[in-house]
Image (cartoon, grey):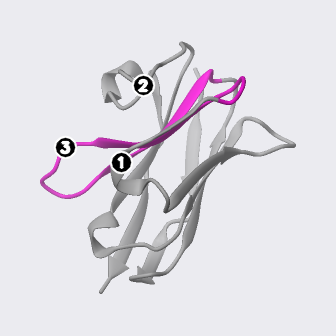
């Protein structure tokens, strides 16, 4: 069982930046960030593979968010969020699994076996 712990959330004004961290207790082949706003479904934000890496982004964050792995500890994944908008306000979750995912399924929550508790991101206008 892999434990995932997120950190780095907070409150910022529109246009600001935050960096989220996801520390995993073990190996995951694919690690992703999801988010869920009140009353909405959980949606995939970005995903990165352990090898490569192969990276996927949701269209709504392309050019603003960057997902990466720590060079020293590849079990830590970051999400750098720039040019934040009020609509980015949500609980952000880290997810991991042991199978390779593709463009067609990386953003499907049920494809992931491991989940963190989430970190809140609030963007005010």
Asked whether the residues under the numbered discs 2 and 1 touch, taking CB atoms below 8 Å apart as contact, a structural biologist would say no
How many C-alpha atoms fall within 10 Å of the one at disc 3: few (<14), some, or many (≥20)?
few
Q: Residue at x 57, y 46 (%)?
A: 5
Q: Residue tagged by mark 1?
A: 59
| Outermost residue to the left | 39
Q: Position of residue 106 (x, y in %)?
A: 42, 27
> In this rendering, is residue 77 above or below 119?
above
- The image shows a total of numbered marks equal to 3
**Left or right: residue 5 compared with residue 122:** right
Looking at the picture, tell me which residue is in the foreground, 95 or 59: 59
Q: Residue at x 43, y 23 (%)?
A: 112
- Image quadrant for the C terminus? bottom left
> In this rendering, is residue 73 above or below 121?
above
| Outermost residue to the right | 72
In whole angstroms, how far apart are the C-alphas of marks 3 and 1?
Answer: 16 Å
Mark 2 or mark 3, which has the lower sequence index?
A: 3
Q: Residue tagged by mark 2?
A: 103
How many C-alpha atoms fall within 10 Å of the one at disc 2: few (<14), some, or many (≥20)?
few
- Image quadrant for the N terminus? top right
Visible residue check, residue 9: yes
* Residue 49 position by quadrant: top right
Q: Residue at x 42, y 25 (%)?
A: 103
Q: Which residues are magenta?
A: 28-53
Asked whether the residues under the numbered discs 2 and 3 touch, taking CB atoms below 8 Å apart as contact, a structural biologist would say no
């Amino acid at each position: 069982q892999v434990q995932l712990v997120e950190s780095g959330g907070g409150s910022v004004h529109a246009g600001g930046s935050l960096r989220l961290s996801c520390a995993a207790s073990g190996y995951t082949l694919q690690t992703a960030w999801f988010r869920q706003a009140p009353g909405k479904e959980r949606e995939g934000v970005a995903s990165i593979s352990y090898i490569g890496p192969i990276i996927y982004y949701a269209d709504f964050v392309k050019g603003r968010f960057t997902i990466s792995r720590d060079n020293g500890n590849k079990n830590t994944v970051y999400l750098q969020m720039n040019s934040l908008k009020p609509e980015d306000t949500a609980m952000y979750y880290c997810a991991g699994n042991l199978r390779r995912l593709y463009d067609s399924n990386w953003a499907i929550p049920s494809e992931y076996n491991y989940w963190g508790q989430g970190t809140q991101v609030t963007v005010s206008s």
